[in-house]
Image: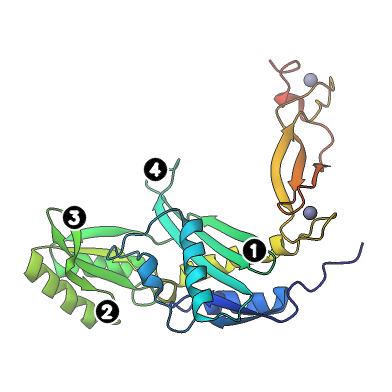
Amino acid sequence: MAGPRPLWNGARAVLATMHGKERAIAPLAKRFLALDLRVAEGLDTDAFGTFSREVERVGNPRKAARAKIAGAFALMPQARVGLASEGSFGPHPSLPFCALGRELVLLVDRQTGLEVAGHHAAIDTNFAHQVVTHTDAGQAFAAKAGFPAHGVIVMGVLDGQPAPHLALFKEAASEADLAAVLARTIALTSAAHIETDMRAHRNPRRMRAIRRAMVDLVRRSRSQCPTCARPGFAITGRVSGLPCKWCAGPTHLTRAAIWGCEGCGHREERAVAATAADPAHCEACNP
Ligand SMILES: [Zn+2]
Ligand SMILES: [Zn+2]
């Protein structure tokens, strides 16, 4: 079979960002997807939700990314393809005291209705926050977060909760700036909530994670359905029952992956590389 054909052949694409994400996304989109990618000038992506809580984000990350893409298409009607990325950060579901960062990059081709998503999840994030009552403590937090290479956001505090409507500083660039905004905020609300800035242009780790999610999107886009050639042919499920090396009975281990196409519904089972399971996983041999 021939290799993947050039996917979009120079088609115009629009990226919904105002935080410099084109640095992570555009080179890969051009080189591997053959997209002519431009930034949606004038799009206010903060209207779709901000990390610093002035605007609450609605819906899940995929819906938020779709909404941004729709906004970008409105600004660039001639674009065939739209891209947006969406990050979410929070406590790790199973590892206590660990933060998990997830990045999604979504691509929508409105000519074919194709939607491809790339993902990256990592505990390699500096997502953190703290309430401080002295500038020293705030500066120590910032140093630990990698400031000034990584940005931090300072906001007021009301009843122990972050209160961005009382005070909000996002652009501190130097130690001196930071000390000044911490002092102003503490003077105003008796304490300051300080947190890592998760906007991509102020967070090099996040920029790397977005790039990895884009690599995943490229990989999925170049995986084409063997029946209809639609991009995005991907694993949709797994079949257990890898035979035991001793008794050949079925184990819980994966025997095959199920690949599926969202376009034509074609499905196929592809066996995993292993042909037999270690007897340690066998109910009969190792009950
Ligand atoms: Zn297909
Ligand atoms: Zn066995």
User: Real-space Cα distance between discs 3 and 4?
Assistant: 22 Å
Q: Earlier in the sequence, mark 4 or mark 2?
A: 4
Q: Which residue is mark 3?
A: 161
Q: Which mark is residue 172?
A: 2
Element carrying mark 4: loop
User: Real-space Cα distance between discs 1 and 4?
Assistant: 30 Å
Q: Which residue is mark 1?
A: 217
User: Real-space Cα distance between discs 3 and 1?
Assistant: 37 Å
> Is the shortest distance between ligand 2 and the CB of mark 4 under 8 Å?
no
For image coordinates 24% across by 58% down, the residue present is 130
| Callout 4 crowding tier (Cα within 10 Å): few <14, some 14–19, many ≥20 | few
Residue 127: percent from the left, percent from the top? 38, 60
Q: Earlier in the sequence, mark 3 or mark 4?
A: 4
Q: Earlier in the sequence, mark 3 or mark 2?
A: 3
For image coordinates 51% across by 66% down, the residue present is 85
Q: Which mark is residue 96?
A: 4
